[in-house]
Image (cartoon, rainbow, N blue to C red):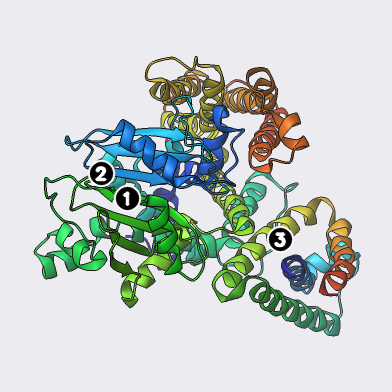
Amino acid sequence: MKDSFFQSMDWLHTWGGLLFGWLLFAIFLTGTLTVFDKEITFWMQPELHHLESSHLNIEAAGQQLTRLAPDATQWWITLPYARSPAVTISWQGSSKDKVEERTLDPATGEIVPVRDTRGGDFFYQFHYSLHLDQVGVWIVGASAMVMLVALISGIVIHHRIFKDFFTFRPRATSHRAWLDAHNVTSVLVLPFHVVITFTGLVIFWTLYMPAGIHLLYGGDKDKAFGDLERRIEREPAQSPAGLVSLSELERQARTHWNGGATEWMEVQHPGDRHAIVTVWRRADDRLALISDRVTFDGATGELLQVWTSELPAFTTYSVMIGLHYLWFDHDAIRWMYFGMGLAATVMIATGLHLWIIKRRDRHAGHHRGYQVVESLNVAVVAGMPVAVAVYFWANRLLPVALPDRAVWEMASFFLAWGLCAVHGFLRWNMRSAWKEQLFVSGALLGILPMLNMITTESHLLVTAADMTWRLAAVDLMCFISGLLLAWTAWRIRPTAFVAQPANKPVIAAEPV
Amino acid sequence: MRWVAMALSYNGLLFCCLAMSKHYRHVFSHAPTGTRRLLFKMTGWLMLIGSFVTSVMANGWSFGPVEWIGGLAVTGLMLVFLLPYAPRVAALFGLVIIPVQAVCLL
């Protein structure tokens, strides 16, 4: 037991922060990239860069589906909008696991052959599940809970939180400068950190707090959501019938909403007498992530249901997850979240670095444990940007016709990251390790616009000239990030001595 | 209107910051008087309230508060990174954007 509450909170903050800091850095970095996931996906699909979503031909999309998937059990049509100008059609056959997808030109309905890539969705899935499915969701959830603990304990131990609100002394001693940077990126951005962590946990409430469903529904999640969402579903009648015009139903659906655009449409049992067409509204003009929907009988066109959320708890939940998902159309807030997310990564990185600095000052020579911690710091904080850069490079360089291309792009990310980890652990001189990896990511990201010029026709000069800012911004942000990373690498002083191998026993002065 | 809110955030934070002796001395090279500190503090808070109001006016009650908090974080970080490297620039920037605010309001 520590002597005081303050010491307990200090211990909690230090160890919770360190042990989960690497995971949290990865979660926050991929989360920050996910803010612009649709833009990144679009950038990674150069075949779609000429598309404009101004004219939308839903009939053509419906015809493609009739041609390609007449026997499917479900059709989906995702409509284009500013962030994603293509139409996507997908369908599911009788075997439940296989969903096929095609990208269409919105005006003509023609299939646009596009390179196989996960795009920004790769970062999205990494962010909430570390690409480990259910286990990953649990790990991320645990990390989020430790993040909340770290935030609150951090506030408790920050005595001078108001006096040092604006204090940043980069030219003071190393320890003070890094601590100031850690404090400033935490305190000034505190509302964001608390809200984003808490709302992130709320998204998976059925996983982390299932008691209500167990009590009221005996653990039957499907029944609980059925009551909540009141979707209309019915079995196919096994007798064929024509499908009412999809564009007509979409137009009718919009009359039930106060303005607002359609996000996607679903057809259950197309071509059957019991077909159902549901039109979903794009939730882009409100905080709450609630998709109002209108349901029609597919064979007769009869209106079956107009649904919107009326339950207060569900609406509250939707506002909370809406604040996390950022589905709404608000570029200023989107950029702010991006900046605040980056501040969070700086907060975590400076925290991880502080742990090392505080102990390096106290102990001459290197304790083996400290070597592990610092190598992990390099591998995660400097290694992840390298991996991100390699992911983008792979998108431009891998042959378009390569089978499983999307998997290869993701593999490049993890291979690059693995190499950085190996480098971080093999390099004795930690300063050089930082310098080298930061320089590599800086160079790769900085040169990316030029690579783009060689490999596509929608590079920065073109997109800046015709003002397609959604594409130009990706190139520009990569370039600026590259400059910042390379400049950071350049600023690191080469060390005066090489670190000693960790075979000298170090007697700790006090138990940590 | 949105830019007015951001400018008021920056200035509000700047004035609250300069209301503290150590930051005031860093920018102006002499200690502030008690009256000046009070004046700066009140101006700072008034401007922060103003930035909230203008943010709601620009974005409505749903997005207004969200953009306000984001704006505070972003302008706050900008201020805090400018202060140690170029304290006069940090202060002058606040001064320069006041006419910008006035023009936007018109």
Q: CA distance from mark 3 to mark 2?
A: 48 Å
Q: Is residue B63 above or below residue A106?
A: below
Q: Nearer the viewer, residue B104 or A68?
A: A68
Q: Chain of mark 3?
A: B
At mark 3, the secondary structure is helix
Marked residue chain, label 2: A
- Identify the image quadrant of the N terminus of chain A: bottom left
Q: Give the Cα distance between marks 3 and 1.
A: 44 Å
Task: Judge whether residue A46 can be spotted in this image.
Answer: yes
Residue under the point 78% across and 35% down: A465
The front one of B68 and A265 is A265
Assign a secondary structure to mark 2.
strand
Question: Dots 3 and 1: beta carbons under 8 Å?
Answer: no
Residue A128 visible in image: no
Residue A411, by quadrant, is top left
Q: Position of residue A362 (x, y in %)?
A: 54, 41
The extreme left residue here reads A218
Residue that label 1 marks: A266
Task: Check disc 2 and report the residue beneath it.
Answer: A74
On whether disc 3 and disc 2 are found on a single subunit, the reply is no
Q: Which residue is depicted at the point 80% across and 70% down?
A: B18
**Number of dots carrying numbers:** 3
- Give the residue pinned by disc 3: B75
Front-lying residue, A358 or A414 = A414
In the rendered structure, are the residues bearing label 1 and label 2 in contact, judged by CB atoms less than 8 Å apart?
yes
Q: Residues within 10 Å of mark 1 (few under 14, many from 20)?
A: many
